[in-house]
Image: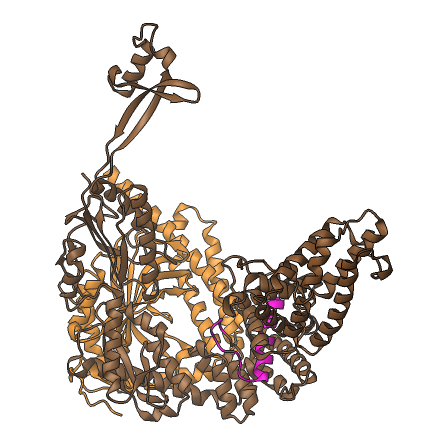
Chain colours: A orange, B brown
């Protein structure tokens, strides 16, 4: 039975204008507009602009789009709601402002949602990423029953208690666009004035589904996982032998990239059904161990940089 | 001045998880009562607490405005030292008065057991309630216990369930003086997030609810629930529909909305070909919608959503919810079809890579053990005259029972485990006995839940639970206190409930031993010691006692008496228990029970049985008529009662035994058991011992409490 009610926003924002509006909204509120990370990630949280920036005391505000790959969620482009890769808008506000819920709701108004005419609620949903040693407390935000945002007060990241607390807002852009446009199938979304989401992305969905469910060679993928892990470990181990200058120059960001690679390769193995539940816990533990060491080194570098610049200020 | 003050506290939060609000409100009440009682401010006033998603509220009228003054008597030096021979105060008296800050003339004397002493009256002025509340309210806020709290500013900031954003704390309309995490109490509450004013002035308990209601917040859960129920009724009744009853969901949506309204939405009737269980689960667990039924109790293509708005103008919200549900149902249909591209049994090998518990192997291992134990159980029942119990079907159902764990449907809707397997089995042509057995085998999931509907389901359900019990106990994972991660108490309760309600003929000890054997002979071949078996048995008996007392309403002593006479065959134990209950109020029974208790005491006092117990009673040694008569009566009653017992007529057997009372009474009136003559004495003790054991096979009467005590 088709609903008899026409959607109230017949000309809902197309996908790219939705992105532009939200970016503009957050840029006006003091966010650095960053770009997507160029290593495969499963969520915007894994971008170093979140994973590393939330550590330590430095205030920071950032917003960026992050295409997020979840190999097991691929459906060959045949399912109207599930995607191998979806787009998140990720916002980090550090420290968390006291009116953060109101600011978030204002961003929904900015994309044309009349809050007084829709059923908007914050329902308990605590977020956790075992591979990153990260978790937070918060909600999923529902708009007329549709989950559109994950709203999290970060408590821990890389196994480190956060101080101050950052708030993380993760917008599910396809869902919001589908809502605004009144579309049931993600591939029917208008991406731009004359292109649909399907025209832009369908082939990618099909091919990566084929690869992750059928073609990815599990032995090779495992080897790639082991190699990335080994290189990350070699690098991280070498940090211990560095002098102060060596520590300052240490490429912890490169170690983190390798850790991200492990995480993606793990997801790929998982979608191939190559991981038993026992092994799963072990592999997640290995990635988390890397992430936690990266976080610790990053924090150490930050605090030594901070103390050096303080010293410099005192001297001048 | 006593006065009656009015107190209002509102802790304004970002959205508190719906399932925690009611409990937190209760805790807040207990904590505030504790503080106000110990400060003597409560008198007869009551503190009321309740909550909504963005607020916890406490209010009280009739608090004392000021604490009562307290007069204390402080004793000083003995009177003999305090006054000299002419009755003038000494230095001791003067310094005591000085220390107490009172004139010497105001001192008086008190008599104590040690003599007369000097004393001073000290009046402690009561403190104003405002002062005390300003101290205890922030403490109370910090003390509310939460399952998982958070911090939201810095690591040393306040911890609470979600960030606190405002506090209203008023005594007689004026804010209290305190600060918690940078917040000070004010007179302003907040209305509905979108419909009401952001700042609502309130003055106390009298206008709080009214003011909030005008800003679209129903602060009291009862008001919200009433609105929900009324609107559900109005939306359904005219169309001949009704909401699928779901008290848990009603409670949840009551705490998910500050101003709940109900809308009725539709879905494509084409989805009605999906099983009802799946439709209801998708609606309830994922969308928090009530399913809707027609007059025949079938699911109708509608749903009821509770929204946090005053109305849905133009059906905009409804259209949104309908679209979301459409996507959810499309997913469910995709899983339903994708999962069945292969048969249920084809999922079996995959269970080898799913860990059940690290020491207890994979689910594949568990299935092998369950198959063996299910067959064993089915065979027991078949051999005990239950022809419906089929070993082959029990084996097949156990083999397929866990396959759905690796299907997409159960990965998405974990709460449908078992049910999905049963539905797939049915759709794929497994016999009905087998598909229902798979469907039901997690049951009962609690004391209120039903047991599996057929024997095969009972066998698989018991095998599943017994394997968990014996396995976890053998691996040392024994529940203690609130820690019971494998829900073993529930498993044990399930086993007992199935046996009792299905009236299954089984030896409990043999069943536990069989579960142990399954674990010892199948991977991971874990050894199960007799001690572990005894622990499991005791754990099961503990749950049995709970069910018999709390669920079936038997008295404590009746349960002890019946189980003391045998607890291996639980069905038999319940039959004996029922007979005992029905007879205990008859005239002879309790007095006889008192006599049995006396017998047991006499025998205990007589020392170890080996020192006095004869091989049999020797009538020729009797000296008194009363003992001869008792022996005769007992022999006769024993003959009759044992025949009745064999025929399962426990009540009649107990009636027979109760007839012994006059003979027993006369025996105790006329005969001295501990006679001088050793032979006579031993013979009498032996008579009593035989009496006790002979007549304790249905219930141990000496466990029965006499009189009305239960």
Q: Quadrant of the C terminus of chain A?
A: top left
Q: Nearer the viewer, residue B297 or B113?
A: B113
- List x then y, in percent, for residue B583: 59, 69
Against A193, residue B634 (above or below) is above
Q: How many marks?
A: 0
- List x then y, in percent, for residue A121: 25, 70
Q: Nearer the viewer, residue B38 or A274?
A: B38
Q: Quadrant of the N terminus of chain A?
A: bottom left
- List x then y, in percent, for residue A86: 32, 77
Against B464, residue A27 (above or below) is above
Q: Is residue B451 magenta?
A: yes
Res. B351 in view: yes
Image quadrant assignment for residue A181: bottom left
Residue that sits furthest to the top in the current view = B86
Against B671, residue A314 (above or below) is above
- List x then y, in percent, for residue A184: 27, 86
Res. A178 in view: no
Q: Nearer the viewer, residue B43 or A58?
A: B43
Q: Is residue A275 magenta?
A: no
The region drawn magenta spans: B445-472
Q: Main secondary structure of the magenta part?
A: helix
Residue that sits furthest to the right in the current view = B620
Residue drawn at x 16%, y 71% is A109
Q: Does residue A24 appear to the left or right of B93 in the view shown?
A: left
Q: Nearer the viewer, residue B616 or B419?
A: B616
Image quadrant assignment for residue B135: top left
């Amino acid at each position: 039975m088709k609903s008899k009610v026409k959607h109230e926003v017949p000309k809902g924002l197309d996908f790219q204008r939705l992105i532009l509006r939200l970016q503009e909204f957050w840029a006006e509120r003091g966010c650095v507009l960053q770009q997507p990370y160029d290593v495969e990630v499963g969520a915007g949280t894994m971008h170093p602009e979140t994973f590393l920036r939330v550590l330590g005391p430095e205030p920071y505000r950032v917003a960026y789009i992050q295409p997020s790959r979840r190999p097991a969620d691929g459906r060959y482009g045949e399912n109207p709601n599930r995607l191998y890769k979806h787009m998140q808008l990720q916002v980090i506000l550090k420290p968390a402002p006291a009116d953060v819920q109101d600011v978030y709701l204002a961003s929904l108004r900015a994309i044309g949602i009349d809050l007084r005419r829709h059923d908007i609620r914050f329902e308990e949903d605590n977020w956790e990423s075992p591979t990153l040693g990260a978790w937070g407390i918060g909600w999923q935000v529902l708009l007329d029953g549709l989950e559109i945002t994950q709203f999290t007060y970060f408590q821990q990241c890389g196994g480190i208690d956060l101080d101050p607390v950052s708030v993380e807002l993760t917008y599910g852009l396809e869902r919001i666009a589908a809502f605004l446009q009144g579309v049931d199938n993600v591939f029917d979304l208008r991406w731009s004035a004359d292109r649909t989401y399907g025209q832009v992305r369908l082939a990618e969905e099909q091919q990566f589904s084929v690869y992750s469910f059928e073609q990815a060679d599990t032995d090779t993928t495992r080897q790639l996982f082991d190699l990335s892990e080994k290189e990350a470990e070699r690098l991280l181990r070498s940090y211990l032998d560095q002098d102060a200058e060596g520590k300052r120059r240490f490429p912890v960001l490169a170690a983190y990239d390798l850790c991200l690679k492990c995480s993606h390769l793990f997801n790929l193995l998982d979608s191939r059904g190559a991981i038993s539940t026992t092994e799963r816990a072990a592999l997640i533990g290995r990635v988390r161990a890397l992430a936690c060491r990266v976080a610790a080194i990053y924090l150490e570098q930050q605090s030594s940089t901070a103390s050096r610049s303080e010293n410099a200020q005192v001297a001048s | 001045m006593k006065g009656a003050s009015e107190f209002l506290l509102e802790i304004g939060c970002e959205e508190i998880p719906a399932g925690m609000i009611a409990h937190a409100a209760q805790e807040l009440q207990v904590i505030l009562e504790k503080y106000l009682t110990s400060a003597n401010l409560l008198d007869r006033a009551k503190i009321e607490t309740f909550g909504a998603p963005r607020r916890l509220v406490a209010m009280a009228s009739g608090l004392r405005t000021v604490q009562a003054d307290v007069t204390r008597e402080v004793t000083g030096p003995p009177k003999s030292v305090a006054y000299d021979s002419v009755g003038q105060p000494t230095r001791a008296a003067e310094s005591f008065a000085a220390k107490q800050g009172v004139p010497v003339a105001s001192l008086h004397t008190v008599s104590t057991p040690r003599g007369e002493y000097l004393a001073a009256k000290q009046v402690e002025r009561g403190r104003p309630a405002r002062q005390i509340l300003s101290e205890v309210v922030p403490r109370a806020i910090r003390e509310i216990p939460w399952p998982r709290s958070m911090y939201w500013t810095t690591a040393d900031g306040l911890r609470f369930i979600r960030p606190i954003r405002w506090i209203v704390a008023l005594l007689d309309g004026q804010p209290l003086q305190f600060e918690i995490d940078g917040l000070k109490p004010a007179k302003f509450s907040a209305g509905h997030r979108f419909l009401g004013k952001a700042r609502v002035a309130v003055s106390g308990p009298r206008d709080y609810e009214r003011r909030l209601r005008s800003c679209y917040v129903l602060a009291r859960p009862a008001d919200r629930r009433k609105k929900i129920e009324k609107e559900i009724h109005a939306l359904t009744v005219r169309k001949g529909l009704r909401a699928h009853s779901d008290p848990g969901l009603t409670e949840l949506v009551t705490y998910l909305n500050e101003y709940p309204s109900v809308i009725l939405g539709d879905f494509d009737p084409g989805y009605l070909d999906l099983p009802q269980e799946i439709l209801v689960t998708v609606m309830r667990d994922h969308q928090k919608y009530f399913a809707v039924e027609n007059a025949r109790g079938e699911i109708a293509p509608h749903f009821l959503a509770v929204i946090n708005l005053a109305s849905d103008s133009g059906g905009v919200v409804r259209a949104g919810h309908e679209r979301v549900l459409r996507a959810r149902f499309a997913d469910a249909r995709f899983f339903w079809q994708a999962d069945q591209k292969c048969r249920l049994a084809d999922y079996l090998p995959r269970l080898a890579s799913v860990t059940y518990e690290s020491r207890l192997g994979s689910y594949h291992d568990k299935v092998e053990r369950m198959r063996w134990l299910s067959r064993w159980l089915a065979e027991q029942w078949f051999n005990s005259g239950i022809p419906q119990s089929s070993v082959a079907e029990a084996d097949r159902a156990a083999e397929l029972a866990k396959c759905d764990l690796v299907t997409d449907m159960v990965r998405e809707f974990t709460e449908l485990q078992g049910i999905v397997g049963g539905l797939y089995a049915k759709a794929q042509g497994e016999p009905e006995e087998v598909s229902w057995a798979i469907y039901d085998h997690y049951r009962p999931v609690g004391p209120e839940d039903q047991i599996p509907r057929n024997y095969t389901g009972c066998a698989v359900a018991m095998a599943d639970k017994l394997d968990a019990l014996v396995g976890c106990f053998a691996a040392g994972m024994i529940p203690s206190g609130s820690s019971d991660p494998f829900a073993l108490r529930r498993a044990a309760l399930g086993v007992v409930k199935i046996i009792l309600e299905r009236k299954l003929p089984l030896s409990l000890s043999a069943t536990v031993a069989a579960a142990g054997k399954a674990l010892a002979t199948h991977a991971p071949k874990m050894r199960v010691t007799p001690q572990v078996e005894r622990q499991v048995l005791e754990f099961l008996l503990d749950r049995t006692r709970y069910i018999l007392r709390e669920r079936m309403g038997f008295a404590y002593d009746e349960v002890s008496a019946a189980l003391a006479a045998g607890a291996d065959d639980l069905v038999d134990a319940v039959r004996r228990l029922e007979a005992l209950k029905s007879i205990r109020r008859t005239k002879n029974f309790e007095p006889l029970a008192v006599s049995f208790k006396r017998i047991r005491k006499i025998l205990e006092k007589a020392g170890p049985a080996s020192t006095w117990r004869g091989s049999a009673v020797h009538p020729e040694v009797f000296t008194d008529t009363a003992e001869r008569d008792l022996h005769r009566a007992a022999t006769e009653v024993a003959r009759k009662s044992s025949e009745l017992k064999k025929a399962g007529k426990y009540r009649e057997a107990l009636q027979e035994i109760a007839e012994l009372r006059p003979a027993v009474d006369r025996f105790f009136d006329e005969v001295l058991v501990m006679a001088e003559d050793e032979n006579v004495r031993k013979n009498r003790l032996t008579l009593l011992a035989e009496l006790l054991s002979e007549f304790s096979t249905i219930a141990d009467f000496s466990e029965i409490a006499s009189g009305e005590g239960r």
